[in-house]
Image (cartoon, rainbow, N blue to C red):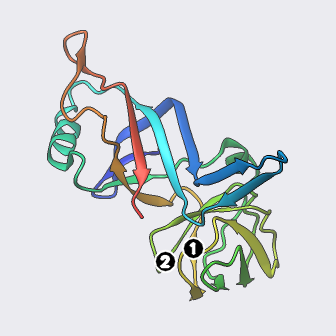
Amino acid sequence: MDYGILQDGAVLAEFVAPMDFVSNQPVLSGDALSLKRTIHVSPAQRWELETNLSPKTWDANRLFVLFTVNGRHKKYQLRVPQNTGVIAARNSFSTIHTCTGAAGAQSLSISNWSGLAPAGTFIKFSNHAKIYMLTDDLSPGASSVGIYPGLFEAVSGTTFVHRDDVEMEAWLDTDNVRGMRFKDGIMMDIGTVKFVEAL
């Protein structure tokens, strides 16, 4: 499965290395005169993706249109890249599971789970758009699993997607190109782009 920018459910532009997919969670820290450090972690969190895109040639026109029209004021739909360790270890095909968790919870109650979804798997619930990551292996018959970050919204009796079908709504970061950049005459290569999760 290709990871990249989606249009009408299909990958319009593939992500290629180098790629950074990182968590941005504000942390405030300060040292007292005694040098004791106080740390406060904000509950706010978003995923940020900085990546190159596979160069385009004769099919560059639709990507050009998308960047020009969406710019930095309309959301983009991305297929989230799963960790290579997750891809190598997973054998999860569960589609009938249900999960429950209160807002702020860092774990889910699971029922009817089959297969293995390793720690580090990105997931998305059917009832809201936030992307989460499993912090434990979700093994066959498991009744609970840890997630990061804590739930932004409660979930009750819902399912999540967890393989190569995790999609994220994102904003194009403010310093990214909005048009065309060509190399070698016919190859459109816009270099590195950065997206931030739309919360």
Near-viewer residue (137 or 90): 137
Q: For the image shown, how many numbered marks are present on the structure? A: 2
x and y percent of residue 63 in the render? Answer: 23, 39
Quarter location, residue 25: bottom right
Near-viewer residue (133 or 12): 133
For this view, does 2 lie left or right of residue 55?
A: right
Query: Looking at the rendered structure, which numbered label has been put on residue 13?
Result: none
Q: CA distance from mark 1 to mark 2?
A: 6 Å
Query: Badge 1 local density, few (<14 within 10 Å), some, or many (20+)?
Result: many
Q: At 54% across and 64% down in the image, what residue appears?
A: 44
Query: Badge 2 local density, few (<14 within 10 Å), some, or many (20+)?
Result: few
Q: Is residue 60 above or below residue 187?
A: below
Residue, disc 1: 160
Q: Amino acid at mark 2?
A: Ser
Q: At 49% across and 47% down in the image, what residue appears?
A: 48
Outermost residue toward the bottom? Answer: 157
Q: Amino acid at mark 1?
A: Phe
| Mark 1 or 2, nearer chain start | 2
Q: Is residue 135 above or below residue 189?
A: below
What is the quadrant of the C terminus in the image?
bottom left
Do the residues bearing badges 1 and 2 touch, measured as CB atoms within 8 Å? yes
Quarter location, residue 188: top left
SS label for mark 1: strand
For this view, does 66 lie left or right of residue 151?
A: left
Query: Looking at the rendered structure, which numbered label has been put on residue 126?
Result: 2
Q: At 63% across and 53% down in the image, what residue appears?
A: 27
x and y percent of residue 65 in the render? Answer: 15, 41
x and y percent of residue 163 in the render? Answer: 59, 59
For this view, does 91 lie left or right of residue 3?
A: right
SS label for mark 2: loop
Q: At 75% across and 68% down in the image, what residue appears?
A: 115
